[in-house]
Amino acid sequence: MSQAQQIKISDKVQGVIERDFSNKVVDRRELTIKLFHIGTGTPSRQELIKSLSQLINAPEDKIVIRKIYTSYGAGISVAKVHIYNKKEILEKYEPKHLLSRGIGKKKEGEQNASQEQKSS
C-alpha cells in the first residue's frame, strides 16, 4: 500500500489525498481529498484550488471542486475534485454553475460594499 500524499491548504488546514484516479475516457484526474480543519471553518474552494494547483502543477482554471462534504462539528471534510487536461473538455462535462462557484463574480445589480459606502 502506498503512502497517502499530504497537502497543506493553509496554516490550520491539512489534507490527505485518499483517492487519485485517472479517468482516461474523459481525460481527467479525479481526486478524493480528506481535509482536516479542526477549530476552523471549512476551507474555501479558492484556497483548495490554489493549493492543488501548486501541488500538482496544473492551471487553476482546469481544476473543478465538485463537492465538499463537511460533517457537523467534526472539523473534517471530504472534497471531490476533477482536474482536466484541456479546457474544452472541462466546459463540455462540468455544469456551468460549478465553473462560476467560489470565484466571487458579482451578479447583475450587486455592488461592492466599498462602492456603496463611497456613494453614501
Image (cartoon, rainbow, N blue to C red):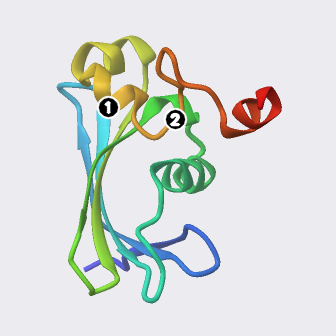
Quadrant position of residue 84: top left
- Crowding at mark 2 (Cα within 10 Å: few <14, some 14-19, many 20+): few
Name the residue that disc number 1 marks: 98
Q: Nearer the viewer, residue 39 or 77?
A: 39
Q: Nearer the viewer, residue 109 or 80?
A: 109
**63 displayed left or right of 96:** right
Residue at figure coordinates x 30%, y 20% from the top left = 96
Residue at figure coordinates x 58%, y 34% from the top left = 59
Mark toward the start of the polypeptide (2 vs 1): 1
Residue at figure coordinates x 26%, y 24% from the top left = 94
In what element is the residue under mark 2?
loop
| Label 2 – label 1 distance at C-alpha | 10 Å
- x then y, percent, for residue 16: 39, 74
**9 displayed left or right of 41:** right
- x then y, percent, for residue 107: 47, 21
Q: Amino acid at mark 2?
A: Ile
Q: How many marks?
A: 2
Quarter of the picture holding the N terminus? bottom left
**117 displayed left or right of 71:** right
Q: Nearer the viewer, residue 42 or 52?
A: 42
In what element is the residue under mark 1?
helix
- x then y, percent, for residue 111: 62, 26
Q: Amino acid at mark 1?
A: Leu
| Residue ranking furthest to the right | 118
- Crowding at mark 1 (Cα within 10 Å: few <14, some 14-19, many 20+): few
Quarter of the picture holding the C terminus? top right
Residue at figure coordinates x 34%, y 15% from the top left = 91
**Which labelled disc corresponds to residue 103?**
2
